[in-house]
Amino acid sequence: EAQVTQNPRYLITVTGKKLTVTCSQNMNHEYMSWYRQDPGLGLRQIYYSMNVEVTDKGDVPEGYKVSRKEKRNFPLILESPSPNQTSLYFCASSPRTGAHGELFFGEGSRLTVL
Amino acid sequence: SQQGEEDPQALSIQEGENATMNCSYKTSINNLQWYRQNSGRGLVHLILIRSNEREKHSGRLRVTLDTSKKSSSLLITASRAADTASYFCATPPSNTGKLIFGQGTTLQVKP
């Protein structure tokens, strides 16, 4: 089944404890992206990647890192999480280069930073 | 930056009625996309309309695009309770790899 898989789906952590949210897609998509969703703010793009070893900042990249060493994986790293990073995170991928095709979304990762 | 803004923020209708949601954006685009999100779930792509298209249909969905006004509308005809969800427009500003979402319209369809 074609899908985007995120892990963990739910996580409660404490300020400063490094964490990684994994994202994997099995559709051989070139484009991958991370979003966070907050009430009243909609979805905001954190980082995106147009291909392996190519990553770019979205609108809210501060406090996050990403890497794209393999086509299928695009992990989101929070080196020192803070409470303002409490949010619902979505990974997405697209078969088109750039953002010109439909995005396929994962089911989301709900992160709470205490 | 807020590229797309939906209007209204919330909409409540009876089953069988039509629902219309609007989206405005700021910069030039190659296409505009509409997505649906059931509560707390991942977004699902509904339809993509290219900048050289004015109208597109998919089942009960009808999307229009007016590039001169930088606006789009999504019409859901003969709505069903299962259409209850949030709907988002998304635009990729030209010459970027970004895809920017609006804040969404929450649609409630009452049985």
Image: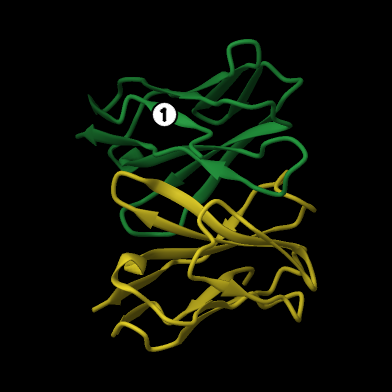
Chain colours: A yellow, B green
* Residue kind at label 1, given as amino acid type: Glu
- Dot 1: within a 10 Å radius of its alpha carbon, few (fewer than 14), some, or many (20 or more) residues? many
Residue drawn where x is 65% and y is 48% of the image: B98
Residue B81 in the image, given as x and y percentages of width and height: 28, 38
Q: Quarter of the image for the N terminus of chain A: give it.
A: bottom right
According to the picture, the residue beneath numbered tag 1 turns out to be B6
Residue A46 in the image, given as x and y percentages of width and height: 54, 59
Question: Which chain hosts label 1?
Answer: B
How many numbered marks have been drawn onto this rendered protein structure?
Answer: 1
Q: Is A2 on the left or on the right of A63, as rendered?
A: right
Residue B64 in the image, given as x and y percentages of width and height: 58, 18
Task: State the residue in front, A43 or A26.
Answer: A43
Task: State the residue in front, B108 or A108.
Answer: A108
Residue drawn where x is 67% and y is 77% of the image: A67
Residue drawn where x is 45% and y is 44% of the image: B36
Q: Quarter of the image for the C terminus of chain A: give it.
A: bottom left
Per the image, label 1 sits on a secondary structure element best described as strand
Task: State the residue in front, A83 or B19.
Answer: A83
Please identify the residue farthest to the bottom as the structure is shown: A17
* Quadrant in which residue B47 is drawn: top right
Residue B33 in the image, given as x and y percentages of width and height: 59, 37
As displayed, is residue B3 above or below residue B85? above
